[in-house]
Image: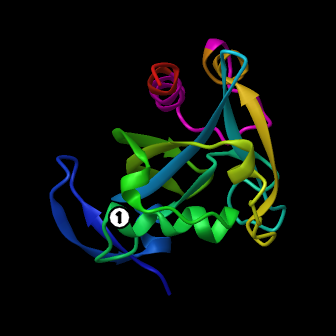
Amino acid sequence: MEYLDVFDKNYKHIGVEERTKVHQNGLWHHTFHCWLIKKEHDETYVLFQKRSNTKEDYPDLFDISAAGHLEAGETPNDGVREVEEELGLSFAIEELDFLGVIPVEASMGIGKFDREYCYTYSKLVDDQLFNQLKLDTKEVESVSWFSLKECKHLLCDNEIDPRFVPHPKAYYQKVIDALSKM
């Protein structure tokens, strides 16, 4: 069983709860998000993972390069393990650019509501580093690059493209705005 720290709406720690109950009861918890980017011909590209078709939540949809829950007692520094677990790349937290803590509220379907404080980071990668990717096929089916222009069009301008995890538009917009300044 996985346990998560839970918080109130002001990000004050209020206890520890089982992950399934956290989502059933819509309790605030914290997560780690890392967006990998590359620069090519004056254009910024963002790496999306395609979630495995065996994942319980959002199978076969494009999502954040690497992300996961911070378990009870963990800090964002511990969350960097998600990049290694999902993509096979190892970084120290100091190698990442901190984009901010983004509060996100979203329905996850019947009986599930997600409230997260997302510790959001990015990492500029080159082809040499990208070629070292080793996907955990239990979690990630494949990866694809999308330009920031494509991201804005697919995730912010209209309805979120159905091929992508339906994070709130405001979340996607904050990330795209931050990445465009890098």
Q: Quadrant of residue 39?
A: top right
Q: Which residue occupies the foreground of this view, 154 or 22?
A: 154
The x, y position of residue 28, in whole percent, is: 33, 56
> Is residue 22 positioned above or below 58 on the image?
below
Question: Can see residue 121?
Answer: yes
Residue visible at 18% across and 64% down in the picture = 13
Residue visible at 47% across and 63% down in the picture = 80
Residue visible at 52% across and 20% down in the picture = 180
The amino acid sitting under disc 1 is Asn
Question: Can see residue 26?
Answer: no
Judged left or right of residue 111, residue 114 is left
The x, y position of residue 16, in whole percent, is: 28, 76
Q: Which residue occupies the foreground of this view, 97 or 86?
A: 97
Q: Which residues are magenta?
A: 157-176
How many numbered discs sit on the rendered protein? Answer: 1
The x, y position of residue 110, in whole percent, is: 61, 54
The x, y position of residue 150, in whole percent, is: 73, 19
Judged left or right of residue 159, residue 75 is left
Q: Which residue occupies the foreground of this view, 142 or 156?
A: 142
The stretch drawn in magenta includes residue 117: no
Q: Residues within 10 Å of mark 1 (few under 14, many from 20)?
A: few
Q: Secondary structure at mark 1?
A: helix
> Is residue 115 positioned above or below 38 on the image?
below
Q: Which residue is mark 1?
A: 77
Judged left or right of residue 169, residue 38 is right
Q: How is the image coloured?
A: rainbow
Judged left or right of residue 10, residue 43 is right
Q: Quadrant of residue 131?
A: bottom right
Residue visible at 69% across and 62% down in the picture = 87
The stretch drawn in magenta includes residue 167: yes
- Residue extending farthest bottom: 1
